[in-house]
Amino acid sequence: MNVPLLQVEQIGKIFHGIPVLTDVHLQLSAGSTMGIVGENGAGKSTLMNIIGGNLTPDSGRMQLAGDNYAPRTPRDAESAGVAFIHQELNLFPNLTIADNLFLTGYPRTTLSKFMLPRIDQRQLLLQSACLLELVGLSVSPKQRVETLSAGERQLVEIAKALQLKPRLIILDEPTTSLSFKERLRLFSLLDRLSNDGIAMLYISHALADVRRLCDAILVLRDGKVVGQGAVEEFNNDRLVSLMVGRESTQQFPQRSSQPSREIALQVENVSQPGTVKDITFSLRHGEVLGLSGLMGSGRTELARILFGLEPMSSGQIKLHGEHVSHLSVARRIEKGMAMLTESRRDDGLCMHASVESNMSLVVEPKFSRGPLGILSKARLAAELRQMKGKIQLDRNAQLKSPVQTLSGGNQQKVVLAKWLLNQPKLFILDEPTRGIDVGAKFEIYALIDQLAASGASILFISSELEELVGVCDRILVMRQGELKDELDRSEFDVDRIMHASLQANQENSA
Ligand SMILES: Nc1ncnc2c1ncn2[C@@H]1O[C@H](COP(=O)(O)OP(=O)(O)OP(=O)(O)O)[C@@H](O)[C@H]1O
Ligand SMILES: [Mg+2]
C-alpha cells in the first residue's frame, strides 16, 4: 500500500476563543507539490505553522510517512525532515551567508581530545559553497546577506532548508518580493527539487504560479477545507469562487471619474547618481499614474525621493505649484503626501502595537484640539471603526489586536488605512496589493478609484502589468533609472510595456 508522505487529519486551532482552523485534512504524496490557496486570513500560514512545528494544534493529528508526527518546535519538524520557508524571511542580514546557513549546527572539529570542539571553518565554507551551488547561486559564502538582492536571499533560505536534507519543504508566499527573472529562477530550482523527490507545500496568491508548479491544490476558506484535488480539477473561475465563497466577479472596477487638466505634481529633471537619471513627468488631479519597470529599475528609489526619504542631487519637485524638494518627510505629509512602502515590516508598521495605534499614527494630530492639543478619542475611534469596515479588515481582527497577530494581507490593509485616514492629496503606492488576495485586491482598486474621483492623485507602482493596465489612466515605464516610455490608456499594451522594461537586460547581457 502506498503510504502518503504527510497525512493531516481533523486539525483545529483556536486563537482567543475564535476558531481559525476547523477540521482541516490534507494528504500529500512523496515528491508531489501542493498549492495552498485562500483569501487573506483563511488560515494558510497558521496551518503551515502547525505542520512546521511553530504552533501546536488544539485538536487533530498528523502522520509523516506513516509515523505519528506531532512537532512541538521547528527543531522537531526539521529533524523529521520538514523545512519551512516563511512569509517574511528569517535571515540575519549582518551575518555571512555561511553563518546563516549553519547557525543551528556548525560543522565542528576536535583538534585534540583535551580541547573543546571548534567551528571547522574549512568545512563550513566548503559545505556552504556546495549548498549555494545546489540552488544555483554564484556568490561567495563569506558575503554578508545584506549585500544580496531579495531573490538571492530567497535562494539562501532554500539552501538553508536543503542543508537539513528535507523530505518536505513548506514555502509561504516565496515570490512576493522577487523580480520576474528571479521568479523564473526560483521555479526552475523548485522543479529540480521536485524531480529529486522532495515534496512541497506552496502558499501563493498568484494562481498562475500555483498552476505552473503544483500537481494538487488545497483551498481554504475561513479555516475550513473547501476544495482539494488534482490541479486539473480546478479552473481559475472555480478556484476563485471556492476561495471567496461566491461566483467570481469582475477583476477591476470601472473607473468612475476622469483626471482633471490641473497638475498636482510636477517632477523636473530629477537625478540622483546610481539610482535615477533626469526624470521628468507630471501627475494631474484625479489621475492614477502607473509606474512600471523591473525590480531594480529605479521605481522604488524614485518614489522614495519624491516622498523625501532619499536625497536627490539635482532637479525640482513641485506639489500644487509649490517647491517641496527641500522639505522633510513630515512637512510633505502635512502638505498631503502619503506613501505606502513596499516592505510593510521594515517601515510600514509597528508589529507589537495594536491595529488602532498603527492606524492612527499619521492622523492623530488632526484629531487634537485647542492649544493643549487634547485628543478627541471618541471622534478618532469612530473614524477608525469606519475605516476598519472600509478596508474590510479580517472579521477576527480587533482594533486592539497587536498587528503581528494579523495575517500578512491584513497587515498590508492596516498600512493602507493609516494613510487613507489622513485623506492624502498625493498618494504614492509601492506594490499596494502585494500579498493581498483576489477579493481584497478588487477592494483596493475600488479605493484607488474613489480617491481619484475625490480629486487625489495616485502614483501606482506595481510589478503586475495586468493591474496597472486595469486601473491606471496612464503608465510610465522605467528602465535603468530612466523613463523610457509613456502610454495613455488608449495605447495600453502589455507587450510594449514588457519590451520597454526589458531592453536594458538584453543590452546588459549583450
Ligand atoms: N498569533 C495569533 N493570535 C491571534 N490570531 C491569530 C494569530 N495568528 C493568526 N491569527 C489569526 O488567524 C487567522 C488566519 O491567519 P493566517 O495568517 O493563517 O492567514 P493566511 O491565510 O496566511 O492569510 P494571508 O494570505 O493574509 O497571509 C487570521 O484571522 C489571523 O488574524
Ligand atoms: Mg499568510
Image: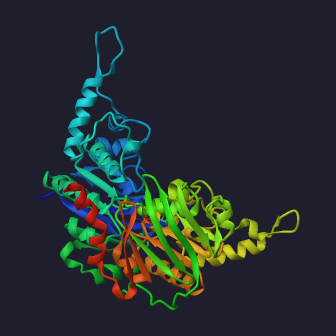
Quarter containing the C terminus: bottom left
- Horizontal relation, residue 405 to residue 211: left or right: right
Residue 72 image offset from top left, x and y in percent: 40, 46
Looking at the picture, the colour scheme in use is rainbow
Quarter containing the N terminus: bottom left
Q: Extreme right residue here?
A: 371
Viewer-nearest residue: 227 or 410: 410
Residue 326 image offset from top left, x and y in percent: 64, 59
- Horizontal relation, residue 268 to residue 291: left or right: right
Residue 492 image offset from top left, x and y in percent: 34, 83
Residue at 19% in and 67% down = 215
The relative height of residue 122 versus residue 467 in the rendered view (above or below) is above
Residue 277, picture quadrant: bottom left
Residue at 37% in and 53% down = 150
- Horizontal relation, residue 81 to residue 406: left or right: left
Residue at 35% in and 54% down = 51
